[in-house]
Amino acid sequence: MVSEEVAVQFKKLLVKPGKKFKLSDCDTAYNGEAITKDEAQQLLAQGLEHLAEIQDKLYAHNRFSVLIILQAMDAAGKDSAIKHMLSGLNPTGVRVYSFKTPSSTELDHYYLWRHNLALPARGEIAIHNRSHYENVLITKVHPEYILNENLPGIQSVEDIDKHFWKQRYKQIRRFEKNLHENGTIILKFFLHVSKKEQKKRFLERIDNPTKNWKFSLGDLKERAYWNDYQKAYEDALRATSTEHAPWFVIPADDKWYARLAMVSILYKQFQALSIEYPSVTEAQKAELEKAKVQLLAEKESTPRSPKKKDQ
C-alpha cells in the first residue's frame, strides 16, 4: 500500500513499550519528503479499499473484534479522521461512541463501566472518540472531578497522589490485557496537534458560520491548561503503551498525512492477523453442491402481468 520508506516513517509513530518517551520529541506536522499530498490522497483511497476487504473477512471470521481509540486536544481532527475511516468501512459492522461528561448513573459505577458497554462484538469494529483515557487525562488536569466518583479513601484533592495515578494506569493496562486475551485487537491513536495549529482551527470555527457550532468557550478555557494536558498525555502514553495495546502518536497539523498514517497503520495491523474467510468442511461442500443442483433444476417461469382492473 505504501513504499517501504513511508512504512518505516509510520513505524516511528509507535510509542515503544517500556522505552523512554517524551511527547515534545514527537512531530506535530509532516516534515518528510517521501510522499506528497497528492500521492497521499491516492494511497488513502487504496488503503480504504483494502480496509473494506479486511473488514469483510473480520466479520466472516467472527473470532476477533477491533477497538480503535482516538484521543487528542480539541480541534485536532478526530471527527474528520473518523469520517474518512468510515468512508471505507461497512457501517453495519462499525460502532462509533463519543464519551462526554459522565452522567450521574455512570458515576454510580466504576469508571470503566460505561466503556465496557461500548465494546465491539466479535467481527465488529468499535471507534471510541475519546475513551476511558479521559479518566487519566482531564481528571489529571482537573483532579477535583475525581471527587464525583465517591471513591473509598478519597475525601479531598490532596488524597489524589502519585500512587493513585499509578494504580489507575495499572487498572487500564489490566483492562486492555483482558480484552486482548479474549480476542479484541486494540489500536490507540493520539492526534498530536500543535498549539499554533489549534489556534488557527479555533479561529476558522469562529469565522466560518458553518463551523460556529463546533466552538465553545469551554474549548478556550481548556486551552489555558495546554502544558498540563501535554504532561498528562505524556504520562498516560508512556504508562499504557503495550505490545497488545500500542499507542501511536500521529502528527495532526496536516490532516491529509494524519488520515493516511492512521489508515496505513490500521491496514498493517489488520494484515498481521492473517484473517481469511472461513473454510468449509467436505460435508458442507457436499451440501453446497446439492443446493446448486436444486437451484439449477428450478424451471424459470415468466412472471404474469397484473390484470387490469375494469374501468
Image (tube, rainbow, N blue to C red):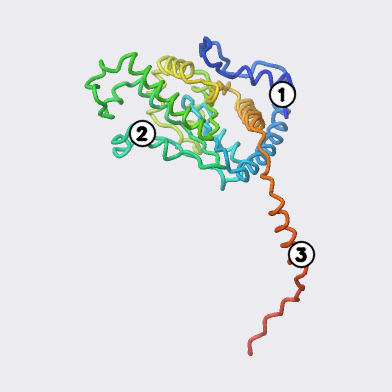
Which kind of residue does numbered mark 1 sit on?
Thr
Residue 219 vs residue 180, the one in the foreground: 180
CA–CA distance between discs 1 and 2? 39 Å
Task: Give the structural element (helix, strand or loop) at label 1.
Answer: loop
CA–CA distance between discs 1 and 3? 54 Å
Quadrant of the image for the C terminus?
A: bottom right
Q: In this view, does 12 lie to the left or right of 232?
A: right
Q: Which of marks 2 and 3 is nearer the N terminus?
A: 2
Rendered image: mark on residue 36: 1
Which kind of residue does numbered mark 3 sit on?
Val
Residue lying at the far left of the rendered structure: 155
Quadrant of the image for the N terminus?
A: top right
CA–CA distance between discs 2 and 3? 59 Å
Label 3, on which residue? Answer: 293
Position above or below: 61 against 137: below
The residue drawn where x is 76% and y is 64% is 293
Task: Give the structural element (helix, strand or loop) at label 2.
Answer: loop
Number of numbered discs present? 3
Rendered image: mark on residue 252: none
Residue 35 vs residue 168, the one in the foreground: 168
Residue 153 picture quarter: top left
Label 2, on which residue? Answer: 101
Residue lying at the far bottom of the rendered structure: 310
Callouts 2 and 3 close, C-beta under 8 Å: no
**Residue 183 percent across, percent down from the top left:** 54, 35
Which kind of residue does numbered mark 2 sit on?
Thr
Q: How crowded is mark 3: few (under 14 residues within 10 Å), some or many (20 or more)?
A: few
The residue drawn where x is 56% and y is 14% is 26
**Residue 15 percent across, percent down from the top left:** 55, 17
Callouts 1 and 2 close, C-beta under 8 Å: no
